[in-house]
Amino acid sequence: MTQQNPSGDPITGWWTEAVIYQIYPRSFADSDGDGIGDLPGITARLDHLVDLGVDAVWLSPFYPSPQADAGYDVSDYRDVEPLFGRLPDADKLITEAHSRGLRVIVDLVPNHTSSAHPWFAAALAAAPGSPERARYVFRDGRGPAGEQPPNDWQSVFGGPAWTRVVDPDGQPGQWYLHLFDTGQPDLNWDNPEVRTEFLDILRFWLDRGVDGFRVDVAHGLVKQADLADWREPQEILSGREEEDKPRPPMWDQDGVHEIYREWRRVLDSYPGERILVAEAWVEPAERLARYVRPDEMHQAFNFEYLLASWTAPAQYAVITRSLEATDSVGAPTTWVLSNHDVVRHASRLGLPVGTPRPNGIGIGDPQPDAALGLRRARAATLLMLALPGSAYLYQGEELGLPEHTTMPDEARQDPTWARSGHTQRGRDGCRVPIPWEADAPSYGFGPTDASWLPQPAVWAEYALDRQRDVPGSTYEMYRTALRLRREYALGRSALRWRESGDAVLIFDNGGLTVLTNFGEAPVPLPAGAEVLHSSAPLTDDGAVPTDVTVWFRA
Ligand code: GLC
Ligand code: MG
């Protein structure tokens, strides 16, 4: 008998092999011409995603928000930001996606609210020690008059992680913790009221039919109880390759797991297979695997993979480690190359191998080699889509879209740029509205030429209408890859290595053989190989050139 979930439906395990497409609502499609993408815009473009061949979408936050961090500062978890539409627009999007066989995952931001959330307003109006303040992390300052922050933690976006409040009587008061922007006060997850509230928010969206949640900063909710000084630069990464080194007191504390076990029970009580996906910047892979134990989340983003260098040994090592770590807890491995927080892989891979992860690229910075970046990005994508497990795509990567690396600094909106004292350009370059039509205003993003971030002139050549049905285009490369991936069940087969040298990786999966050439010399294919797909043309005598991935039957 097939296994069943509580509603009696057969268990499909769809999420173990799903290709999930990330939509960044501000920048996907604008229906009303105000220059900001919106939910009706997304609904109108769903057929594009069916045509592409993905299984699900994940939407970055679209809830009411002052937009201090592009919507990751939520002031009401149960509604839609008017810029993006209204609640019925969300319902319609979910229904229309489901009618096309697409699942819908929404973003949940539990580490912090917006400072415009009614809870935070109540906390500011209430006295130190009050139940209102106990929903957040308020502390007295250090120093004789409390004029120093309670500890030395820094914000991920730069500057101190504490802001001092002004009391209702006009006097300087306590300090509150914000690991991100001042507009994003951290919640106190030791408080049962916070826990109950989020269980209710989960139910609110589950009742509306969503298929899951991507959990923002999942490794940050619980802080070490003594809020001890850290003395090291702040990164979002828990950043400890070796188990025995001290871990930062704000990340990856053991107490977070209990929260996700409770959430899992809620999800499992609903019909269908609803999933939790952890955004947890946790190293090493064995620590990350703890988030996807059988009674916790379903998946976790594999940022170690995203961060790995473009060399055969580095790629071999990260793929092997990732598969082992998730196998050890029986969870699917996930793969990702781009998202709204990192330089797009078509540009990242155009920087010299070994360049440390850039936090944005701007005028005056060393510029990536666009052609090399795209060639490697295509090879990396075909390698990724041939791996077993679940893969995440970020809107625009199916067009080979590069980072906007010459955006005028005045146009930047990511709080990182100001908070870092104009040293880190931040994430605007990967968030530019995407091009649909080469010759339309705003490249077809919306009905007018308005665009909340400037679109570079090169967008025309990347527009969807220049690539659809064009053999060899990046869009057609993705489409074919997704079709073959399904046909050969690559997502649920097992990988077997054939070669893992310094220059070439070869593995078998689902009846296909996959070869990536990282070296300088072309690599011949075995005699009789039947090539099914490749990221670029082969040489005249059928060999695989540098920076190319080929799928073939041996
Ligand atoms: C996550 C989001 C990022 C956001 C941060 C704070 O890392 O992906 O965009 O700025 O959390 O919510
Ligand atoms: Mg709009």
Image: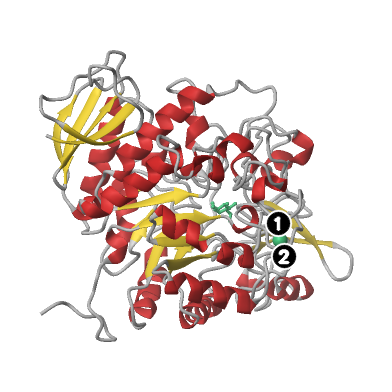
Q: Is mark 2 within 8 Å of ligand 2?
A: yes
Q: Residue furthest bottom?
A: 7
- Can residue 222 be seen here? no
Ligand 2 shown in quarter: bottom right
The reply to whether dot 1 and dot 2 touch (C-beta < 8 Å) is yes
Vertical arrangement, residue 350 with respect to residue 450, above or below? above
| Image: 458 above or below 28 | above
- How far apart marks 1 and 2 lie (CA) works out to 7 Å
Q: Residue at x 62, y 46 (%)?
A: 437
Quarter of the image that includes the N terminus: bottom left
Q: Which mark is residue 36?
A: 1
State which tag comes first along the sequence, 1 or 2.
Answer: 1
Local secondary structure at mark 2: loop
Q: Please state which amino acid type lies under the numbered disc 2.
A: Leu
Q: Secondary structure at mark 1?
A: loop
Q: Dot 1, how many residues are within 10 Å of its Cα: few (below 14), some (14-19), or many (20+)?
A: many
The mark found on residue 83 in the picture is 2
Is 136 located above or below residue 385 in the figure?
below
Q: Position of residue 223 (x, y in %)?
A: 50, 58
Residue 112 at what x, y percent from top left? Answer: 60, 63
User: Where is residue 476, by image quadrant?
Assistant: top left
**Displayed quadrant of residue 154:** top right
